[in-house]
Amino acid sequence: MNADIDHVLIPEEELLRKVEELGKCLARDYSGRGPVLIGVLTGAVVFISDLIRACRIPLSVDFMAVSSYERGTHSTGVVRILKDLDRNIEGQHVVVVEDIIDTGLTLSYLLEALQARHPATLRVCALLDKRGRRRVDLQLDYVGFEIPDEFVVGYGLDYAGLYRNLPYIGVLRPELYASEEG
Ligand code: IMP
Ligand code: MG
């Protein structure tokens, strides 16, 4: 195990089993509808690349990058689109694929921006849900795991740009990150 990791929260086999399950759910629900899966960069890249291979129906993939204007580590809910979609999603069946929903502020902004483009349907598939920290009311249609309020890395999630390539979800040793929250 990586020496910076305090403990593994979700091991690789468990992640892959769950992602396979989510992919099958999506395939069942979107059969014949040719959905567009939108990955939110950068955290969702590992998840979405396993997810689309587990979802064995015709589909397309696109990406968006957003940045929250933050004060310290506090999300303000003001979000800027850094990279927009390559396609028009009007009339399309859209699934937003996220790594983790924390306060929900980022996703809530994103959903509003996407809804304004009039997709036929708009749903959310999130690997991790830190429900205890939610600050806005959000409906998550597909969720991998509900997790406690701990800072996690791996399987796409980073701290200061690192640890995205770990194959599991782990909790970082607390002395390694300077939490500004209080
Ligand atoms: P929200 O607007 O508070 O829901 O922010 C969600 C975003 O914060 C995620 O897409 C991640 O980029 C980041 N984030 C929240 N919690 C964690 C964590 O435990 N590890 C890594 N990134 C996190
Ligand atoms: Mg993210």
Image (cartoon, rainbow, N blue to C red):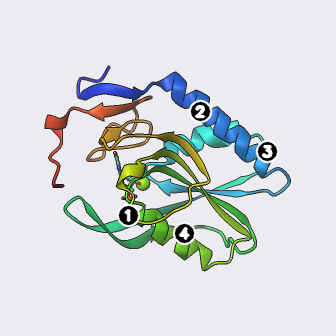
The residue beneath circle 2 is 18
In the displayed orientation, state which residue is furthest to the right. 32
Does any atom of ligand 1 lie closer than 8 Å to the CB of label 1?
Answer: yes
Quadrant hosting residue 106: bottom left
Marks 1 and 2, the one that precedes in the sequence: 2
**Residue flagged by tag 4: what amino acid is it?**
Leu
Q: Nearer the viewer, residue 16 or 86?
A: 16
User: Eyeballing the image, is 76 above or below 32?
Assistant: below
* Left or right for 17, reference 147: right
Mark 4 crowdedness (10 Å alpha carbons): few <14, some 14-19, many ≥20: some
Marks 4 and 3, the one that precedes in the sequence: 3
Which of the image's four quarters has the C terminus?
A: bottom left
Marks 4 and 2, the one that precedes in the sequence: 2
The residue beneath circle 3 is 28
How many angstroms separate mark 1 from mark 2 (CA)? Answer: 26 Å
**Image spot of residue 79 (x, y percent):** 39, 71
Q: Secondary structure at mark 2?
A: helix
User: Eyeballing the image, is 106 above or below 29?
Assistant: below
In the displayed orientation, state which residue is furthest to the bottom. 116
Marks 2 and 3, the one that precedes in the sequence: 2
The residue beneath circle 1 is 135
Marks 4 and 1, the one that precedes in the sequence: 4
Residue sitting at 57 percent across and 29 percent down? 16
The residue beneath circle 4 is 111
Quadrant hosting residue 28: top right
**Residue flagged by tag 2: what amino acid is it?**
Lys
**Image spot of residue 86 (x, y percent):** 61, 67
Mark 1 crowdedness (10 Å alpha carbons): few <14, some 14-19, many ≥20: few
Q: Nearer the viewer, mark 1 or mark 2?
A: 1
User: Eyeballing the image, is 116 above or below 122?
Assistant: below
Residue sitting at 43 percent across and 41 percent down? 156
Q: Secondary structure at mark 1?
A: loop
